[in-house]
Amino acid sequence: MVTFGKTLRQKQIQEWQGYYVDYKLLKGKVKRYVEQIEVSAENPENVMKDFSRILDKQIEKIVLFLMEQQGELARRLSGLGEQHDSLIQQADGIKASELLEAYRNVANDLLRLLFFVEMNATALRKILKKFDKRFGYQFTNYYVKTRANHPYSQLRQVFKHVGISAVVGTISRNIADLQDLHGCYTSIYDQPDLLPLDPVIKSIKAAVDRLMDSTDFLHYLGKHALIIPDELSSSSEDHVADDRYHFLSLLLNLANTFLYMVNTYIIVPTADNYSMNLGAAATVCGVIIGSMAVAQVFSSVYFSAWSNKSYVKPLLFSTIVLLIGNTLYALAFDLNSIYVLLVGRLFCGLGSARAINRRYISDCVPRNLRMKASAAFVCASALGMACGPALACLLQTNFKMFKLTFNEVTLPGWVMAFAWLLYLFWLWIFFQEPSNENKENKSTAQQTMRSENIFIENSVAQPLILSLEETQEDEDREFDVSEEAAEESRKPVTSLMSAYKLLTPSVKVQLFIYFMLKYAMEILLAESSVVTTYYFIWSSSKVAIFLACLGLTVLPVNIFVGSYLSNILEERQVLLASEVMVCLGILFSFNVTNPYSIPQYVSSALVTFVSAEVLEGVNLSLLSRVMSSRLSKGTYNGGLLSTEAGTLARVIADGTITLAGYWGMSRLLNITLLPSLAICICSIIGTCFTYNSMY
């Protein structure tokens, strides 16, 4: 694949120096704004307007030069097109080779132009992020929303590469025609996958892919998985990821995600019956369900650390532990021991490999496929959540074999034990461990890429700076030192405390929102069998159908939000509206009438669950953008933090159900809903306070 080396990049930067974003000028402006606001000499609104005007001028400079270069490429392509038309009549192989080389020269110049756009887009993203960080409110949202959606948008030229795609299409089509002198009359427009195998076209395609930045259902689901991308990427890093990628291993990784979610929810409809069969109260179902979450708090950490060295070994260990856990869960009935039951569920929690599932996608899937893999991760989780209760509904039987009881409470354990045994067999045979050599190469590639970007950042800033006074140059130099320190601080964090220190107030609020919604959902799901049996005398099969129907709403809701709602409303608006709807759903769930009706319970549960799903997607989408890039890699990554927050919420919720059982079944529902309501109100207050301080 044709790529730009460091020397060629430096040469191009020097040649087009006056047309790059003046990064040092913008950094100096940010610093002066901070100093002026500190002494109350400048209104923040005036700062935003002034900085917007400066950015507009910088972007206008880039766009006018980009259009000029596109016009030059179009002129050259027009001339080559006339030569191509005459060549078709002659079928001259020598002239075809010369013309093919001419098209490749144009393609190389286009690649230089794409590199120019990429560097400027990176510089703009970095300066916008810097402005947000220094001032504590999201200027980026304001600037992008007002500029990108305007009919005369110049920002779209930079981030959406308008017009470049047409040039790429012209070059690709003509190179494909010239490589096929026999005339099969197959167009790339008829078969989009039939692109020429020329290396320069592959490089152009890779460069265009790096510039893609759209908000659609696929990207929305990918962010829902909270697999945080690095801010910077390079072709060398993508090449390493290509070497580590193995499709069947990715499928096995997603299968692990699906099976674990099935394992989590398959026991929910029958957990209360199981506890009563073993001589315990029905509300002990909270402990049975929650014991898995307790163990998951610890397993997430050691699996995340283990994945630094291997993927197949922790996955094998996880599968074996889950196999043992489900077997113990099923045997507890014949052993008549609640302790064996709880130990079985603890083993299931210790086998939670979701940290590995996220990490594998982040490290071993090429960047151009990572968003699809992340979306598949979310879909697998949602499908498992729906299939668990649905499968429990089908296991309504009772018989004995080899002195073992197979009924509605033990069959979930036996079925999952068999599923994990089958999965262990496939994992052992087909999973391909990514080589450690490639892992080391990836780390080296990242370091090289970062050093090149530091050079580029410093190089693109030369214009206009020479005219500044010497004192200002000294200030900028001091500012650069802090920037270099920031570059050094991009290494992965090595402790949970270090990760916590990187969390900004807005990130902490969003993690609290995640805690809140997981708490509310766990209360709803975990106590559903107890509540519906007490108030409506529902059987286990009816509870299973109810939970399966709730689980089936996950994907349609995400499709609606990702494809439609997120394109017409700001995410913070959807976030706040979803929190309010969760709060209303909890309020409507309280038992204030006698008798408590099925329509009230089902409708309030549906509002709570659907709103929480919308909230989870939007919240994690925001979290994936604002969380520090240092949390994208390493043991203590962003995915681990969100998993720990959600798991802790489930543990506390399940404990609340069991404790509330001491006050009697008639008070269980209202007592468990009170903490949910209080936490939800606190999250709404936190959201309003945080975003009011940002805008």
Image: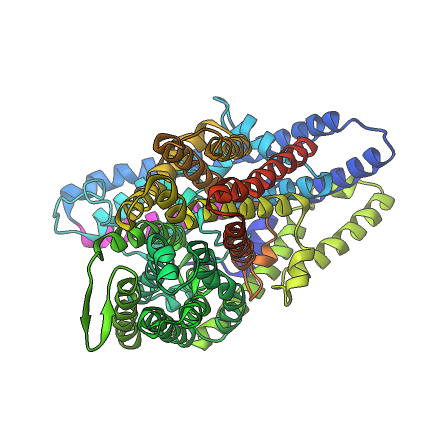
Which residue is located at x 54 percent, y 46 percent? 514
Q: Is residue 424 above or below residue 200?
A: below
Task: Specify whether residue 408 is in view.
Answer: yes
Q: Position of residue 635 (x, y in %)?
A: 56, 66
Region in magenta: 92-115
Visual colour scheme: rainbow
Image x and y of residue 531, in percent: 41, 44
Relative depth, front residue between 123 and 439: 439
Residue beneath the point at 50% across and 66% down? 295
Q: The C terminus appears in which quarter of the rendering?
A: top right
Q: Quadrant location of residue 32?
A: top right
Please give the count of numbered marks on the rendered protein.
0
Q: Does the magenta portion include 109?
A: yes
In this image, 87 relative to 570: left or right?
A: left
Identify the residue at image location x=30%, y=42%. Answer: 549
Residue 200 appears anywhere in the view: no
Q: Above or below — where is 369 with respect to 43? A: below
- Picture quarter containing residue 279? bottom left
Picture coordinates of residue 366, whole percent (x, y): 40, 59
